[in-house]
Amino acid sequence: IYPYVRNRCRAIATMAREDNFGEIVGYIVEEAIGEDLYFERLGERVPDGIVSRSFPWGEMYLDVEDPGLSRRLLRYGVHERTSSRIYRRELRRLAEDVEEEVTVLELGANIGYFLLMANDVLGERSRIYAIEPHPRNLDLLEQNVARNDLDDRTEVIEGAVGAEPGSGVLNVMPESNWHAVAPDGGVRTGAVETLDIDIQ
């Protein structure tokens, strides 16, 4: 039970550092009763379920109904903290070593989290190709690109990337950042639906 309690305390400490006290209450309630009333109430205040938030790397539209990436950003202000830190570090190294334009391929761009980080570090030197197959993610991705004035340096492409062009089946998971194309075209455990998509 100690690791469970330790991890929950770390999560609450992270939210406290970000001054996310509403999320802290919601998190504690969710742990106690299995429902997150904070996000339920937030969702009731925005008819389309989309809220806007500012982060150090840019402005983002987030989907309060998505228990994955969007809620993590709303709750913690960061997603995959270690991966994000390493990604930014490697981008800074790249920026120091390369003087020319840098091409960024964002495969499975979701709603643009890592794309905006790349822009934050590389700035005007970046040329970004963001590929995303899920319609809801794609819509938010396009809105986040436009909101941060990246249309001139970012090409958003609907679809997925595979070994050969063609079609595939996207397994839609409850959390938007877990959608995946099954290599055999099958249905993954936990998928709520499947979508036919283009493979580039």
Image (tube, helix red, strand yellow):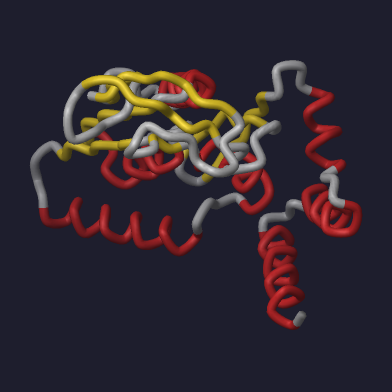
**Foreground pick, 62 / 188:** 188
* Relative side of 160 to 140, left or right: left
Q: Could you tell me if residue 178 is visible in this image? A: yes
Of the pair 75 and 164, the residue shown nearer to us: 164
- Residue 54, percent across and down? 58, 38
Residue visible at 55% across and 44% down in the picture: 189
Relative to the observer, which residue lies in front, 138 or 116? Answer: 138
Percent x, y of residue 11: 69, 64
Residue positioned most to the bottom: 2
Q: Quadrant of residue 142?
A: top left
* Residue 102 % position (x, y): 16, 40
The total number of labels drawn is 0
Where is residue 121? Give x, y as percent: 32, 47
Say if residue 147 shows up in the picture. no
In what quadrant of the picture does the C terminus appear?
top left
Q: Determine the residue positioned at 50% across, 41% down.
A: 188
Residue 54 falls left or right of residue 40: left
Residue at the spot x=19%, y=23% of the render? 165
Vertical position of residue 2 compared to residue 44: above or below: below
Residue 183, placed above or below residue 19: above
Which of the image's four quarters has the N terminus?
bottom right
Residue beneath the point at 53% across and 51% down:
79
